[in-house]
Each structure stands twice: as C-alpha cells, then as structure tokens.
Image (cartoon, rainbow, N blue to C red):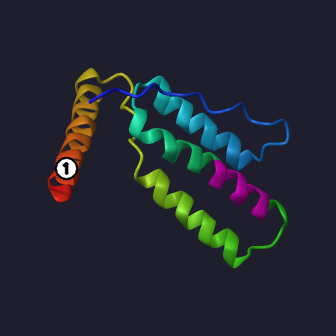
Amino acid sequence: MEQLELFELEAAKPDATPMEKHARNYLETLRGQGLIQAHHELRCAMIVELSRAVGEGLAQGKKTIATTNLAKQLNDMLADMPQPLAQGNKTLDALAITLENLSHAAFQQVMTNAQQ
C-alpha cells in the first residue's frame, strides 16, 4: 500500500479563537511525537474547523444548540485520535505506537474483508 505524504495544516489566522489555538497545539504535539499518520489528516483538518466554529460560538456569549452539537462532535473526534505519549517512559511510548499501528492494521483488514 502506498504511503500518502502528510500535509501541513495552514497556519492559524491572527484572529483565531483560543479553542482553535489549543486544538492546533494539541495536534502539533501529536505530530511532533510521530502519532499523526496519513489516515489522521482529514480528521486533523476537521478538528481545526470544528474548534474554530465552537470557539466562535462560545465567543458570542450564549450557548446555542448548534454550538453544543459542534462541541460534542469535536469531543468525539478528539477521543478517537491517538493519545499523547507518556513523556520520558520509552517502554510506554513504544507500546502506544505499536498499539496504534496494530489497531489501524486490524481496522484496514476488517474493511478489506468487508469489501470482498
């Protein structure tokens, strides 16, 4: 299977909300730890867009159903992302990476079998 090249998210605009800035920092932490792979890229872009929308919704000073729904979607997407590595514990770091890779490989195998 061909490995897709990872792309950089566009830089935050000067008026980015704190929510968007925190989401970008979180994703960059994951990227810096080597946890973001090609199959995560679309999700990363969606997390940035959702965090921007949630931040703008919260900045208006009142909670709306739309903002609440977007916040839930953002939370769900973040929960499905790889977790940051346990800094300083090489055994746990290696285990986390191995489990992530095995989980992805198992998912790909299930999807391939389902399509046959």
- Please state which of residues 80 and 22 is positioned toward the viewer in this rendering: 80
Where is residue 93 drawn, in percent x and y?
Answer: 30, 28
Asked if residue 13 lies in the magenta stretch, the reply is no
Which secondary structure is most common in the magenta stretch?
helix
Q: Is residue 89 above or below residue 46?
A: above
Mark 1: amino acid: Thr
Tell me what residue is drawn at x 31 percent, y 27 percent. Answer: 2
Which SS class for mark 1?
A: helix
Q: Is residue 20 above or below residue 85?
A: below
Circle 1 sits on which residue? Answer: 112
Snapshot quadrant of residue 1: top left
Tell me what residue is drawn at x 62 percent, y 38 percent. Answer: 24
Where is residue 82 drawn, in percent x and y?
Answer: 38, 41
Q: Is residue 84 visible?
A: no
User: Which region of the structure is painted magenta?
Assistant: 49-58
Left-right relation of 28 to 13: left
Q: Residue furthest bottom?
A: 65
Q: Is residue 106 visible?
A: yes
